[in-house]
Amino acid sequence: MAPRPSRVIDPADGQIPYLPWARAHQQEIQRNADNPRKREHIDPRARCLPGGVPREAFPTGFRFLQVPGAVVFLGNQKSVSRIIPLDDRPFLDDRIKLWMGDSRGHWEGNSLVVEVRNQNGKGRFDMVGNFASDAVRVFERWTVVSERVIEYRATIEDPDVYTRPWTLFSRILKVAPSHEPYGDELWEDACHEGERSAEHMILSSDAAAAGPKPR
């Protein structure tokens, strides 16, 4: 089976430019993602925790609301939300760390340009352990291409984890009302951070050595 194309468009090889220690950490999580042996091998989303920025932009549904002086992002999973002020207010003190970070935005033509700081570094980009630290800055560009298409670009900077900034790209499609029983309404996601079933995903060393049970 051919590998899926990478969302990473810079570097051109589609690989996140990790520092050596960070690459080793990500690869350990990836090796153990299906059969976790430690708590840190488990995707935080399995514990009903937010994925952070940019992960919550895809692949789940979300809604944008435009209100005076701000754009509001409402996510379908984990009840995540972001308020993106469009004025010149300063960012929060960098000692304050949040799951979805602190966003500031402005419009450039039909593109919403957003800088995100103050993430807590506990979220991940995907199920196989790609990550950033709490020093990460994300520079997003949401470009309205048509009534149903938004092009999303995010450049990620984190000198504690990467050798240089890198950029991902995704095309986001608006769901037509006819595709959902209640139009574009967001349904409640009842998952919450008190979820404890993830603990049962951790294999003991004996179980891991024995391998999967026969069916």
Image (tube, rainbow, N blue to C red):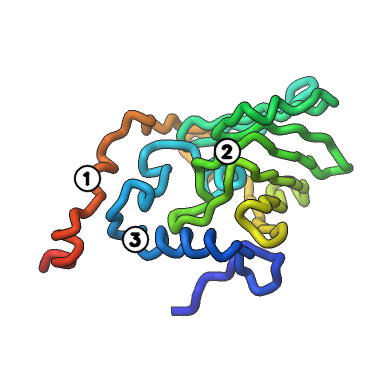
Q: Residue at x 66, y 55 (%)?
A: 171
> Of marks 2 and 1, which one's residue comes earlier in the chain?
2
Residue at far bottom of view: 1
Q: Is residue 33 left or right of residue 211?
A: right
Three-letter code for the amino acid on which mark 3 is drawn? Asn
Residue 130 vertical placement versus 212 (above, below): above
The residue identified by callout 3 is 32
Q: Is residue 200 left or right of residue 121?
A: left
Q: Residue at x 79, y 22 (%)?
A: 69
Instruction: Say few, some or many: other residues with alpha carbon within 10 Å of mark 1 (under 14 / 14 to 19 / 20 or more).
Output: few
The residue identified by callout 2 is 62
* x and y, in percent, of residue 165 in the image: 72, 57
| Image depth: mark 2 or mark 1 in front | 1
Question: Are the residues flagged by discs 2 and 1 in contact, CB closer than 8 Å?
Answer: no
Question: Are the residues flagged by discs 3 and 1 in contact, CB closer than 8 Å?
Answer: no
Label ID, residue 200: 1
* x and y, in percent, of residue 83 in the image: 67, 27
Q: Name the quadrant of the N terminus.
A: bottom left
| Image depth: mark 3 or mark 2 in front | 3
Three-letter code for the amino acid on which mark 2 is drawn? Phe
Q: CA distance from mark 3 to mark 1?
A: 15 Å
